[in-house]
């Protein structure tokens, strides 16, 4: 059975929020889009709202999906959703650090292998967002 992980591409003023992993050791220090696993009985949007509340202390609105299924491992896929902040300022509750990356900074962090192609797909989308 495939496990679905959801991630938020939180966009604000042409910038995207990146989160630096604290664990597991093999991923620590890499940068990702915040999110987590979808629990049984939970929709993907509900999971993403919950994860952002737990990991970042913010409320988000979940928008459209970016691309399709982004493979993580043989058993895991990631689904990324454009998201906007509704309330709160993101704080790294479970991450080492957070950074807002503007167009000149999109690739200034070492993205995790699974998240890098998502950033490339997002780059064009962010330019056309209102």
Image (cartoon, helix red, strand yellow):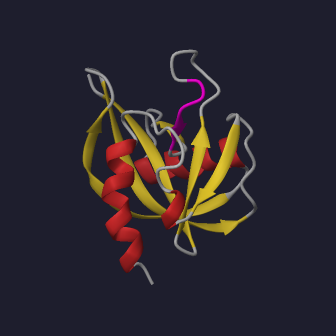
Q: Quadrant of residue 70?
A: top left
Residue 112 screen position, x and y as percent: 44, 34
Residue 35 vertical position relative to residue 87 in the rendered view, above or below:
above
Residue 125 screen position, x and y as percent: 35, 69
Residue 16 vertical position relative to residue 38 in the rendered view, above or below:
below
In the figure, is residue 24 to the left or right of 95? left
Q: Is residue 39 magenta?
A: no
In the figure, is residue 23 to the left or right of 40? right
State the extent of the magenta-drawn residues as a range. Answer: 28-32
- Magenta segment's dominant SS is loop
Q: Is residue 30 magenta?
A: yes
| Farthest residue, direction bottom | 130
Residue 93 vertical position relative to residue 103 in the rendered view, above or below:
above
Question: At 53% across and 58% down in the image, what residue appears?
Answer: 105
Question: At 60% across and 43% down in the image, what residue appears?
Answer: 19
* Count of residue discs: 0
Q: Quadrant of residue 3?
A: top left
Q: Quadrant of the C terminus?
A: bottom left
Question: At 25% across and 20% down in the image, what residue appears?
Answer: 74
Q: In this view of the protein, which residue sits in the foreground, 110 or 17? A: 110
Q: In this view of the protein, which residue sits in the foreground, 122 or 75? A: 122
Question: At 51% across and 63% down in the image, what residue appears?
Answer: 104
């Amino acid at each position: 059975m495939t496990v679905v992980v959801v991630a938020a591409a939180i966009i604000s003023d042409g910038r995207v929020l990146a989160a630096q992993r604290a664990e597991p050791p093999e991923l620590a220090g890499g940068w990702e889009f915040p999110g987590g696993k979808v629990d049984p009985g939970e929709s993907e949007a509900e999971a993403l709202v919950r994860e952002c509340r737990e990991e970042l202390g913010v409320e988000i609105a979940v928008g459209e999906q970016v691309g399709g299924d982004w493979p993580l491992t043989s058993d895991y896929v990631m689904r990324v959703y454009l998201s906007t902040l509704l309330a709160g300022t993101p704080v790294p509750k479970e991450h080492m650090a957070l950074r807002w990356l503007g167009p000149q900074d999109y690739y200034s962090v070492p993205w995790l292998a699974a998240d890098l192609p998502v950033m490339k797909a997002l780059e064009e989308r962010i330019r056309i967002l209102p």
